[in-house]
């Protein structure tokens, strides 16, 4: 899944009004942030195999450290634990944990059976990606709902809060549609370089937009401000 992960990150803002959208994106996308690094290092493997499923030309040969359920539970505990140690915000730490693990659940729904339960363990996948239109309809619907929840849970403090937010929303959408309709990537190296640059741009925009927006939930708690 692609924008479906960001949909959960956007939506989580309502539950954790003090947590930056960039942090929520890192949690929802942690598997896909680790993945290009591990591909670049040769620890995990991917092949370009057009027709693997109708929605992706990629054959995810092995990604036990970034994409197995067990490792995502561990990454979730680590990330949630660090966040709790720094902020003492138990609720936000739980949301971060859930977001990290949610990546497995969403990819399990979309991928063919290539999602490991644990490194070396059985691989599962419901294969939503075997139906191009259904997969796209599900992801776009999730994305629309997630963006709407974030837009209602926050309010722009200034022009940047409005414009950077919409640039982020449209850029992610364009990246998703581009990757869905473009042909297969030219090389594995192109995959991980694009993924890393995309992550960096997305996180900077998410952090920037979020800094220029107020959480409606917090505003209600402090009526004097
Ligand atoms: Zn993934």
Image (cartoon, rainbow, N blue to C red):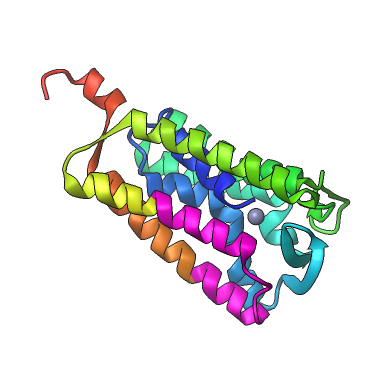
- Looking at the rendering, the stretch of residues picked out in magenta corresponds to 169-196
- Who's the residue at 37% across and 44% down the image? 86
Front in this rendered view, residue 80 or 123: 123
Quarter occupied by the C terminus: top left
* Residue 221, percent from left and from top: 24, 19
Q: Residue furthest right?
A: 122
Give the answer, above or below, for where 183 lies relative to 119.
below
Residue 6 in view, yes or no: yes
Q: Is residue 22 left or right of residue 209?
A: right
Residue at (74, 71) in percent of width and height: 46
The mark tally for this picture is 0
Measured as percent of width and height from the top left, residue 56 is found at: 72, 61
Image coordinates of residue 220 in percent, x first then y, are: 24, 19
User: 169 above or below 186?
Assistant: above
Most common SS among magenta residues: helix
Q: Quadrant of ligand 1?
A: bottom right
What percent of the width, then of the height, locates residue 101? Answer: 63, 42
Left or right of 223 in this view: 187 = right
Q: Quadrant of residue 31?
A: bottom right
């Amino acid at each position: 899944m692609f924008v479906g992960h960001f949909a959960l990150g956007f939506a989580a803002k309502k539950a954790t009004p003090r947590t930056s959208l960039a942090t929520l994106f890192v949690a929802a996308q942690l598997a896909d942030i680790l993945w290009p690094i591990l591909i670049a290092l040769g620890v995990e493997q991917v092949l370009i195999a057009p027709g693997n499923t109708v929605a992706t030309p990629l054959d995810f040969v092995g990604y036990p450290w970034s994409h197995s359920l067990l490792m995502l539970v561990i990454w979730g505990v680590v990330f949630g634990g660090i966040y709790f140690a720094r902020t003492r915000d138990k609720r936000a730490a739980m949301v971060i944990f859930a977001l990290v693990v949610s990546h497995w659940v969403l990819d399990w729904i979309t991928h063919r059976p290539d999602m490991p339960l644990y490194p070396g363990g059985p691989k599962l996948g419901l294969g939503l990606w075997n139906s191009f239109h259904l997969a796209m309809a599900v992801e776009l619907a999730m994305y629309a709902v997630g963006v709407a929840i974030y837009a209602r849970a926050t309010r722009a403090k200034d022009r940047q809060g409005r414009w950077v937010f919409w640039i982020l929303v449209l850029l992610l959408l364009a990246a998703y549609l581009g990757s869905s309709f473009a042909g297969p990537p030219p090389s594995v190296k192109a995959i991980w370089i694009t993924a890393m640059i995309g992550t960096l741009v997305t996180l900077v925009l998410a952090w920037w937009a979020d800094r220029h927006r107020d959480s409606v939930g917090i505003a209600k708690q402090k009526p004097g401000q």
